[in-house]
Amino acid sequence: MMNIPNLISDILKRKSVIGFDENQTKTSSTIFCRAICFGSYRIKSEKVVLTSKGIQIVAPSSENKDLTVLNIQHSEIVKLVTSFGRPLIIFIYTKPSTARYIREQLKLSENSEISPHFSPVSPNESQRKITLLADNFTAKDINAIKSVCDSLQLEEINHRDAQEMLFRSTGISFSKH
C-alpha cells in the first residue's frame, strides 16, 4: 500500500541533478536514447542527462502522455551495468523507494501483475530495472559517463552479454550486420 505523506515528502525534497552551485564542478553527458524502459514501460526517443549528481530523464506519463522530469539522485542508484558498444546499453538498478517515486510520476501500476510496472524487487526480470538504449554517442560521452558514474557501482560487461540481458528484459533484439 502506498504511503501518500512519504511520497509527497519525497517529491518535495527531490533536487534537480542538473543544477550546480558555482562552487561545484559540473560533469555531465547528454545521451539521446532511441528507447528507454522503466521496467515494462517503454518509451521512445528521449534525452537522458547523466551528471555528477545523478540522472535526469524526461518521460511521458503512461496515462496522458504529459512529460515528466525525473531526477534520480546518485544515492538512489544501486548499480549501473553497461556495454559501451554500439548501440550503447545501460541498465540502471534503483532502490525500491526510487521505483515508487518513478511509478507515481509516470502513473505506472503498483501491481506487478498489471503492466506497465517497475520495481527492483519484482519477480519478473523485465520489471526490475531502467534500460537505456542509444545509437549516437561519442568517446567524449563514454568518458563523461565513466567519470560521472565513478562513484556508483559501475559494472562494464561485454556487448554480447548486454544484448542477451537486453533481450531477456525488454524483448529488443539486434541482428548482426
Image (spheres, grey):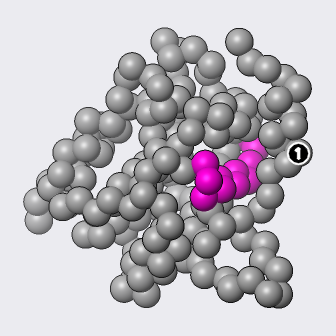
Give residue 99's position: percent from left, percent from top.
Answer: 60, 35
Residue receiving disc 1: 12
* Image point (80%, 58%), residue name: 15
19 to the left or right of 40: right
User: Of helix, strand and loop, which one carries label 1?
Assistant: helix
Q: In this orientation, does residue 106 appear?
A: no
Residue 36 is situated, as x and y percent measured from the top left of the image, at: 48, 50
Locate residue 127: give its quadrant: top left
Q: Residue at x 35, y 29 (%)?
A: 125
Residue at the image point whose x is 19% and y is 45% from the top: 164
Looking at the rendering, in which quadrant would you find the C terminus?
A: bottom left
Q: Position of residue 106 (x, y in %)?
A: 68, 37
Q: Looking at the picture, does residue 40 appear above or below residue 139?
A: above
Residue 76's place in the image compared with 134, above or below, is: above
Question: Neighbour class for label 1 at 10 Å: few (<14), some, many (≥20)?
Answer: few
Residue 162 visible within the image: yes
Above-or-below relation of 69 to 53: above
Q: Tell me where the magenta segment starts and ends, as one range.
A: 65-76
For the view shown, which residue lies furthest in the left direction? 176
Q: Quadrant of residue 122?
A: top left
- Which image quarter is the N terminus in? top right
Is residue 65 found left or right of 80 in the rendered image? right
Residue nearest the viewer, comparing 100 with 95: 95
Asked if the magenta segment contains residue 29, the reply would be no
Residue nearest the observer in this picture, 6 or 92: 6
Quick check: 28 left or right of 122?
Answer: right
Q: Residue at x 11, y 60 (%)?
A: 176
Number of disc labels: 1
Q: Amino acid at mark 1?
A: Leu
Residue 167 coordinates in the image, percent (x, y): 25, 41
Q: Dividing the picture into quarters, in which one does residue 123 lie?
A: top left
